[in-house]
Image: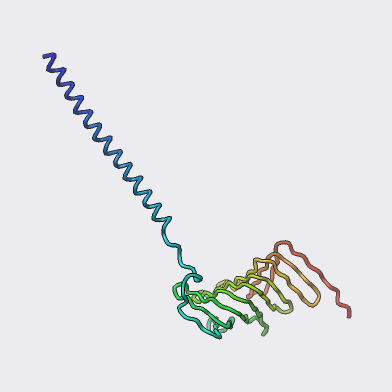
Amino acid sequence: MGEDCKNLHIKSLTRSNRINIVVISLIVLLIISIVVIFIRHRADQNHSPAPLRPETTEATLTIKNFHHEASENGKKKWTLEASSASLFASQNMARLTDISIIFLLKKGQNLTIHANQGDLNIKTNDMAITGGITAEIPPYSLTSESLNYEHGSRMIHMNEPVEMTGASMTLKAGALTYDITTEILTCDHHVEGTFIEILK
């Protein structure tokens, strides 16, 4: 009787050990599967192709003597002329060269900007222009190398050094913001100015 109990106990332990081994094996396989899936997912992310930039894609259309107008409620807000425009339809973007922009201000005045090149979002009318920028904001003239225009807020941002001259002053700043609606100009970052007294 004692021998039978002993054998039964050994068989129970063996069966229990087998169950434990099976459970542990399943857990190990599950962990390995999760690790493999994670590694493959990271690899796929690392090898995903980056969005194509306009420099690496072909233009849908190239236009010489490009003309564009932005209007609101039937009223013209600004006009743009460029010697050439390369249109990238998938990015809703036009790459421009030799740019001239005229913003219509209050009291019949205009804000005129010239630049070497830039990008126009043909869907939002936002712009980013660079190179040899000159701007005429009566009674001031400005020069810089970079300018961003936000059409929704009608704000101009120059985030690179700006030099502004007027009849009786010269001013340099690290950045400049101009609100076309209110015609308020704000200079920022290391502003330096020279004012000249005009004798009558």
- The answer to whether residue 195 is above or below residue 100 is above
State the image quarter where residue 111 is shown.
Answer: bottom right
The residue furthest left is 1
Tell me which residue sits at (14%, 17%) in the image: 5
Q: Quadrant of the C terminus?
A: bottom right
From the top left corner, tell me how far across and down residue 139 is, in percent.
74, 79
The residue furthest top is 2
- The answer to whether residue 162 is above or below residue 28 is below
Residue 151 visible, this angle: no
Foreground: 183 or 112? Answer: 112
From the top left corner, tell me how far across and down residue 140 is, in percent.
73, 76
- The answer to whether residue 11 is above or below residue 48 is above
From the top left corner, tell me how far across and down residue 145 is, in percent.
66, 70
Q: Is residue 80 left or right of residue 47?
A: right
Tell me which residue sits at (52%, 76%) in the image: 94
Q: How many marks?
A: 0
Colouring convention used in this rendered image of the protein: rainbow
Residue 37 visible, this angle: yes
From the top left corner, tell me how far across and down residue 182 is, in percent.
65, 74
Tell me which residue sits at (30%, 42%) in the image: 30
Q: Quadrant of the N terminus?
A: top left
- The answer to whether residue 148 is above or below residue 74 is above
Q: Is residue 10 left or right of residue 124?
A: left
Q: Is residue 63 left or right of residue 111?
A: left
Tell me which residue sits at (73%, 70%) in the image: 163
The residue furthest right is 200
Foreground: 52 or 104? Answer: 52
